[in-house]
Image (cartoon, helix red, strand yellow):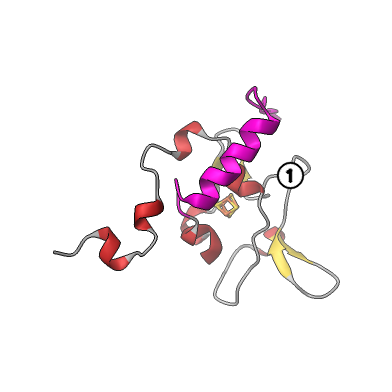
Amino acid sequence: MNTDTDTDPYAESVDPRVHCDRCEAVCCRLTVVLMPDDHVPAWLIHRDASGLETLAKGEEGWCAALDLVHMRCSIYEERPGICRKYAMGGPSCRHERGKWRDAHPFPTPVVLR
Ligand code: SF4
């Protein structure tokens, strides 16, 4: 039998009760380093003085590709590899959600423009 734990050594560390629907996209506030295989629109690329390319962020601190009205990725089909590998409910996800909850006990109001 081929189970998730056969192919993914970290599958058993994912908490299935955790879901993006009940999150303020806190993972989309992390720095995403772009890899050569990533193909995101040029306006989303931030290049620092050393040449390192990361996803640009908006004033509010979220990734510039995040649709702040719906809190959804606007380039989901072409999102970078790091975003694809980030496991919903995994240890890093739960850690970031915990940090955000501790710092923001009330939901963040979304600014409509
Ligand atoms: S590209 Fe999409 S999934 Fe990745 S950080 Fe930005 S909004 Fe989030």
Whether residue 80 is visible here, answered yes or no, is no
Q: Position of residue 6 (x, y in %)?
A: 26, 66
Q: Is residue 94 left or right of residue 109?
A: left
Q: Is residue 84 magenta?
A: no
Q: Nearer the viewer, residue 1 or 85?
A: 1
Q: Quadrant of residue 2?
A: bottom left
Depicted 7 relative to depicted 23: above or below: below
Residue hosting label 1: 61
Q: Position of residue 83 (x, y in %)?
A: 53, 58
Badge 1: residue crowd in 10 Å (few <14, some 14–19, many ≥20): few
Whether residue 94 is visible here, answered yes or no, is yes
Q: Position of residue 62 (x, y in %)?
A: 68, 45
- Type of the residue with mark 1: Gly
Q: Quadrant of the C terminus?
A: top right
Depicted 71 relative to depicted 35: above or below: above
Q: Position of residue 64 (x, y in %)?
A: 68, 49
Secondary structure under tag 1 reads loop
Magenta range is 87-113
Q: Quadrant of the N terminus?
A: bottom left
